[in-house]
Image (cartoon, rainbow, N blue to C red):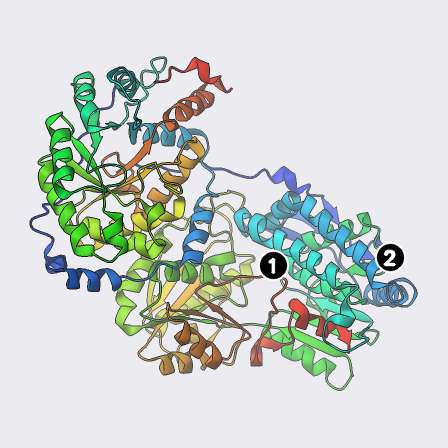
Amino acid sequence: MTRTVPAPRTTSDASSPHPALADVGRDERSLRRFLHGLPGVDQVGLERRAATLATRSIKKESKLQAIDMAVSMIDLTTLEGADTPGKVASLCAQARRPDPDYPEVPSVAAVCVYPDLARVAAERLAGSGVNIAAVATAFPAGRSSREVKLADTALAVENGATEIDMVIDRGAFLTGRYGEVYEEIVAVKEACGSAHLKVILETGELAGYDDVRRASWLALLAGADVIKTSTGKISPAATLPVVQVMLLAVRDWHRVTGELRGVKAAGGIRATKDAIRHLVAVNEVAGPEWLDPDLFRFGASSLLNDLLRQRRAQLEGHYSGSEYIGSA
Amino acid sequence: MVDWTYAPAPESAAIANLQPTYRPFVDGKFVDGGGEPLKTVNPATEEVLAEVGTASSADVDTAVAAARRAFETTWGPMPGAERAKYIYRIARIVAERARELAVLESLDNGKPIRESRDVDVPTASAHLFHHAGWADKLEYAGLGPAPKPLGVVGSVIPWNFPLLMAAWKVAPALACGNTIVLKPAETTPLTALVLAEIAAEAELPPGVLNVLPGAGDVGAAIVRNTGLNKVAFTGSTDVGKEIQRTLAGTGRRLTLELGGKAANIVYDDAPLDQAVEGVVDGIFFNQGHVCCAGSRLLVQESIADEFTELLHRRIETLRVGDPLDKNTDVGAINSRAQLDRIVDLAAAGDEEGAQRWTSSCPLPERGLFFPPTVFSGVEQTMRVAREEIFGPVLSVLTFRTPEEAVAKANNTPYGLSAGIWTDKGSKALWTAQRVRAGVVWTNTFNRFDPTSPFGGYRESGFGREGGRIGLEAYLDA
């Protein structure tokens, strides 16, 4: 059975922020006041909690369930200069049916490619329920003009992308020009049309956990459907403490507005063990509502194969070599 | 929403290498005690774990005499560098047998395996390693040019951290050249007896460490034994006072580490999510069976509602149950008597008008369990704000100004520990200088390290354990 992953639910309309936060995005000054008024994040306590969550022991049927959940949350990604239609096609085949020997394995949430290859993905994935995600806005650096970024977004949407992964302007963020970052996200959101917007904070380039919290809120205020850790091009990428801060942000957003927004952990998650630790964090920090491909994603390329190997090991009682699993 | 239930992940009880019977350890040998044997139970099931021989008062005399002999003939005269080798060896074996000790501790005490594995046992071995390093450097401890051991130490320890408390007494006593007679708690004697076995395995000379299980009468017999040079006690304030009366005027040295009713002060500029973590850890760690537990939350009124909401939400995720399950956060209450006391004090909270909130987590059908509980609307006059509950029960009070926070924090006869949560360093220091507590944690709680002295003020006792200053309690300097 192929699990159909529904498109992320519509959670917001950037042009009309929630009444509780209506004035925050009004101008640079009020944005700054709001973001700097958020409670601080204590590094020691945050990392201690992450370390404790990582000690959870997920075994037997709960592990099998976690593996299937993780598969259904993957944005199967290829973002190389050497990407070709052939490479994308093979990725799409694995995305639809990750393990043909075990057809009950769900399909992944999306395939994530550069904008020019989105059309290939769209053709290959038609009718599968797998979403087509495209990175845009001069990914990964985001160093270009607003026009180029919007054109990049438009190209991706035109080519059939149903999800857009944009990067924030870290230069503007780090120099405190929050208004610029905000406006850019709002503009990209508009260019997305009905496509869903994931906003990449590139946390490895931000100045610590307080910045991650501020960037998360900034993106949520500007209308991000999902906040995403990293491009995958910078290390460190998705770490448990960083993901925890972002999960706290969407939890707090929900407390204030009643809206459910998502988190995508991207980059550096290669092993089943790491994926399960993230799912534990989702379950216990944000809450079980977020254990849903609409609301939590993994951006990964090699994770899927490790999940499939571990899945087989659970069922067959022994590990099989990677050559027994078809790999895109 | 997905219903993702974590499958049970129990640690195997067989790892504890549980024996049907245990006996007192005197003069390097396990011997039949003259006291009535006691049965130690697993609080998670109320099943008997083992039968444990106890000491009679004659056994106490024998043990003290053996300790005296060892002090005068082998351990006292031995150079520090040689003593260190034995203590290092014990520390290493504790670390090597960590898994066995952790499972045994969880069986006997009821604490979650995650805590015995990640806190109790590693901290115990760290304490031994730390003090082994001091054994040949005592003259550089800043306590005088030629500090001398005191002689024979008598020590009575509680049931909340059985192995760790044993290590806290044994490590400094031995490092400083003393010998020791140790009585573990009546309900948790097993790991201290395995520690004795480890000492024998390390070929510690006979008589240096003696372990005498038993109830309060054995403790009383040790404490009033005239052959001792020092008594070190960790336990309740009532018993501590009695010991102090017994020892008054005898010239025997005494250190007491007693109860507490610690305040966790949360200012409105605190890192809220981590403060929630710290408050939860402060009161629910080890089921709240912690003398330094942060049992009084003092939260600034401007954030009280939001903080309480976040706190309840977090407490809901605590997993209460089988102590041997690796995913258990809160284990079993150590004894029926302690559970009754917690139930009584919680009822007093209801009667006095505090609002009780209880986690909706399921509790096991059998065994001694109490759900994580929070009383809000607590006032300084109420029993739940004044008496040590020693269980998973948090009292929430509010304050308006830093001065009021300090006044409320100090409005208790205890003074063991306190927590301060603020992102503003100057405010943390200002508060720490005014809170009368032996240990003050800032933006963290319940952190223990052998290099850091631990101990209280006023009715929480006197003397320090750990660190350079902790050596003073075991030296004539």
User: In screen coordinates, is B415 left or right of A219?
Assistant: right
Instruction: Where is residue B188? Give x, y as percent.
Output: 64, 56
Check disc 2 and report its element: helix, strand or loop.
Answer: loop
Given the image, what chain letter belongs to the residue carrying mark 2? Answer: B
**Residue wearing tag 2:** B206
As shown in the figure, which amino acid type bears the numbered disc 1? Answer: Phe
Q: Which residue is mark 1?
A: B161
Vertical comparison of A71 with B256: above or below: above
Q: What x and y, as percent, mark residue B346? A: 41, 66
Callout 1: SS: loop
Disc 1 and disc 2 in contact, CB within 8 angstroms: no
- Badge 1 and badge 2 both on one subunit: yes
Quarter of the image with the C terminus of chain B is bottom right
- The answer to whether A139 is drawn above or below residue B155 in the figure is above
Residue A189's mark?
none
Q: Is residue A1 visible?
A: no
Q: Would you identify the image quadrant in which residue B68 lies?
A: bottom right
Quadrant housing residue B239: bottom right
Q: State how far apart marks 1 and 2 are (Cα).
A: 26 Å
Q: Residue furthest bottom?
A: B249
Which residue lies at the image location 83% right of the left edge and 71% below the top edge?
B151
- Say which quadrant the N terminus of chain B sits in: top left
Depth check: A242 or A171 in front?
A: A171
- Which residue is outermost to the left? A15
Closer to the chain start, of discs 1 and 2, is 1
